[in-house]
Image (cartoon, rainbow, N blue to C red):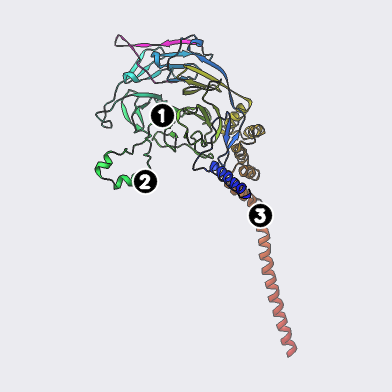
C-alpha cells in the first residue's frame, strides 16, 4: 500500500510538472471565459473586460441577409462598411447599425461593372473606398460619391514571375495614398502600389522558418530525394491593419513572430516586452495546437487586438506587448462565434464579424475594461498621476494582473520616486524596469549624500596631514631637547 501511494504521488507530481512545462504547452486556457497569463506562464482568472451586448445580422439592420461576409471597416465618423462577399456588395451602416447605403456596382468607361467575390476593403480618411475585388483579380478605388477613381489590375514587373496570379484579399491605404495589398499565394510580403496604381515593391517579407534536422537531411539527400521534399518558403501573412502614423500591423501563421509592426522600410519594430510574445494563447491542449491569428485591429495609444480564428478569442495588448485582456470564444451563446473572420473598434466597443452566420457581435466595456484602457492611455499620454491612480484601481479589481504593477512602477519612475518604483517592478518581475529604477535611485542617493561624503573625506585628509605635521614637528623638538641635555 505504501509503495502504491508513493507511485501515485510520483505520477501526480509528474503530471503537474508536465502541465507547467513551457516547452510542451499542454495546459490550456480552453474553456475559460476571461483570463490572463502570469509571469510563470500560468493561467490566472481575470474579470471580464468586455461583454456582448448586441447581435446584429443583415436582416435586423434592414439591409437584407448577409451571405458569407468577408471583411468590414469602421471609419473615423463611425460608419461601418460591411463587405457582403456572397452578395458582391458593400453595405454601409451608421454607428447604431442602421443602413445608410448599399454599393453594388460602379461605372467604368460608360459601362456598369460589379464586384466578384470581394474579400477585403478599406476606407480612407477622405471616405474613399478601396476594395480587393478578388474574383476579378483587381483593386477598385471609389471616391466618397462612389465614382471610380482607378482600377489596379494584375501588375507587370521584373519582381514578379511570368506566372504570377494576382489575387488580392486584403488592402490598406496610408496617409500618402500608397496602397498595400495582401495577395493570396505571395510569400514576399505585402505588395506596395504608388498613388497612381503602379506596383513598386514588396514590403515586410517573413523569414523562412524550418526545422534544422530537415535542413541537414536535405543537404545530405540526393537530387531525386530533394525534388520530393517540401521547399523552405516563408509563411504568408493572414491579415493587416494600419495605424494613424502609417505603421502596418500584420499577422501571419509562423510559430514565432505572429504579430509584426512594419515601418516604411519593412522592418519589424514591434515591442515584445511582455511576459510572452503577442501570439494569442500560450497554453493549450496539445491536440488543438496554438492560436491561428486571422485579423488584427489597431486602436489608440498603441493598443492592438488580434483575433484567433481557431478558438474565436480576441486578445488585446498594449504597445509594450503586455496582454491586457481576453474575451470571446466559439459556441452558441451570446458573445461566442461560429466562424469569426474580422474585428473592428467602434469607439470603445468591439465588433466581431462572423462569416458563417453573417452576424456582427457588439461588445461593450465593463468597469474593469474601461479602467484598464484609461490607465494605458494615461501612461501613453504622459499623465503619470492619472496612470498611477487608474492602475491602482485596476489592481484592486484584479490582483492577478501582474503587469499592472509594472505600470505603477513606470508611473512612479516618471514621477521620480525611484525607490517606490523598485518595489512595484519587483512585484511584476520586470527586471529591466527594476534595473533602471535601481540605477536612478543609486544616483539619487549618491547625489544626496555626495556633499557630506566629500566634506568628510576632505576633513579626514586635512586631519591626516595635520597629525603628520604635528608628529613631525613634535619629533623634531624632542630630538633638539635630547641633544641640548647631552651637551
Residue 286 lies, with reference to residue 446, above or below; the image says: above
Q: Secondary structure at mark 3?
A: helix
Disc 3 from disc 2: Cα separation: 63 Å
Image disc number at residue 238: 1
Which mark, residue 213?
2
Q: Nearer the viewer, mark 3 or mark 2?
A: 2
> Is 80 part of what is drawn in magenta?
no
Residue displayed at 53% across by 39% down: 274
Q: Nearer the viewer, mark 1 or mark 2?
A: 2
> Is any atom of residue 456 visible in this view?
yes
Q: Nearer the viewer, mark 1 or mark 3?
A: 1
**Residue picked out by circle 3:** 451
| Distance (Cα) linking label 1 and label 2 | 27 Å
- Label 2 near label 3: C-beta < 8 Å? no
Circle 1/circle 2 CB separation < 8 Å:
no
Q: In terms of image quadrants, where is residue 437?
A: top right
Helix or strand or loop: what does disc 1 sit on?
strand
Q: Which residues are magenta?
A: 98-124
Q: Judge by depth and name the residue closer to the eye, 84 or 216.
A: 216
**Number of marks:** 3
Q: Secondary structure at mark 2?
A: helix
- Disc with the residue nearer the chain's start (3 vs 2): 2
> Is 125 situated above or below 249?
above
Mark 1, residues whose alpha carbon is within 10 Å: few (<14), some, or many (≥20)?
many
The tag earlier along the polypeptide, 1 or 3, is: 1
Image quarter where the C terminus lies is bottom right
Residue 8: x, y in percent?
59, 45
Q: Position of residue 117 (x, y in %)?
A: 36, 17
Amino acid at each position: 500500500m505504501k509503495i502504491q501511494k508513493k507511485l501515485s504521488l510520483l505520477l501526480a507530481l509528474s503530471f503537474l510538472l508536465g502541465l507547467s512545462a513551457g516547452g510542451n504547452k499542454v495546459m490550456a486556457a480552453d474553456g475559460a471565459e476571461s483570463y490572463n497569463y502570469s509571469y510563470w506562464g500560468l493561467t490566472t482568472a481575470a474579470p471580464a473586460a468586455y461583454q456582448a451586448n448586441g447581435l446584429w445580422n443583415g436582416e435586423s439592420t434592414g439591409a437584407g441577409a448577409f451571405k458569407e461576409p468577408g471583411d468590414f471597416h469602421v471609419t473615423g465618423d463611425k460608419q461601418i462598411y460591411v463587405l457582403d462577399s456572397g452578395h458582391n456588395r458593400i453595405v454601409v451602416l451608421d454607428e447604431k447599425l442602421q443602413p445608410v447605403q448599399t454599393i453594388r456596382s460602379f461605372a467604368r468607361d460608360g459601362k456598369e461593372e460589379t464586384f466578384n467575390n470581394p474579400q477585403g476593403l478599406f476606407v480612407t480618411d477622405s471616405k474613399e473606398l478601396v476594395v480587393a475585388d478578388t474574383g476579378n483579380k483587381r483593386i477598385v478605388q471609389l471616391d466618397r460619391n462612389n465614382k471610380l477613381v482607378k482600377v489596379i489590375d494584375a501588375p507587370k514587373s521584373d519582381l514578379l514571375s511570368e506566372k504570377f496570379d494576382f489575387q488580392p484579399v486584403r488592402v490598406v491605404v496610408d496617409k500618402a495614398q500608397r496602397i498595400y495589398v495582401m495577395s493570396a499565394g505571395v510569400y514576399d510580403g505585402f505588395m506596395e502600389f504608388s498613388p497612381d496604381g503602379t506596383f513598386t515593391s514588396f514590403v515586410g517579407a517573413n523569414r523562412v522558418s524550418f526545422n534544422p534536422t530537415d535542413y541537414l537531411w536535405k543537404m545530405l539527400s540526393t537530387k531525386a530525394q530533394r525534388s520530393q521534399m517540401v521547399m523552405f518558403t516563408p509563411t504568408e501573412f493572414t491579415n493587416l491593419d494600419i495605424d494613424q502614423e502609417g505603421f502596418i500591423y500584420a499577422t501571419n501563421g509562423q510559430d514565432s513572430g505572429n504579430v509584426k509592426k512594419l515601418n516604411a522600410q519593412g522592418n519589424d519594430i514591434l515591442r515584445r516586452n511582455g511576459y510572452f510574445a503577442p501570439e494569442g494563447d500560450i497554453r493549450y491542449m496539445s491536440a488543438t495546437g496554438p492560436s491561428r491569428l486571422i485579423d488584427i485591429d489597431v486602436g489608440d495609444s498603441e493598443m492592438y487586438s488580434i483575433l484567433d480564428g481557431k478558438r474565436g478569442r480576441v486578445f488585446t495588448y498594449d504597445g509594450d506587448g503586455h496582454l491586457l485582456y481576453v474575451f470571446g470564444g466559439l459556441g452558441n451563446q451570446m458573445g461566442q462565434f461560429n466562424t469569426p473572420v474580422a474585428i473592428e473598434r467602434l469607439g470603445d466597443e468591439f465588433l466581431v464579424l462572423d462569416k458563417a452566420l453573417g452576424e456582427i457581435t457588439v461588445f461593450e466595456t465593463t468597469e474593469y475594461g474601461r479602467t484598464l484602457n484609461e490607465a494605458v492611455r494615461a501612461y501613453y499620454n504622459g499623465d503619470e498621476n492619472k496612470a498611477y491612480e487608474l492602475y491602482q484601481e485596476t489592481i484592486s479589481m484584479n490582483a492577478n494582473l501582474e503587469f499592472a504593477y509594472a505600470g505603477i512602477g513606470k508611473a512612479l519612475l516618471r514621477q521620480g520616486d525611484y525607490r517606490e518604483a523598485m518595489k512595484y517592478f519587483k512585484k511584476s518581475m520586470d527586471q529591466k524596469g527594476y534595473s533602471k529604477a535601481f540605477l536612478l535611485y543609486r544616483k539619487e542617493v549618491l547625489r544626496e549624500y555626495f556633499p557630506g561624503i566629500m566634506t568628510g573625506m576632505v576633513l579626514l585628509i586635512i586631519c591626516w596631514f595635520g597629525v603628520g605635521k604635528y608628529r613631525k614637528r613634535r619629533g623634531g623638538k624632542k630630538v633638539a631637547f635630547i641633544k641640548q641635555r647631552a651637551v
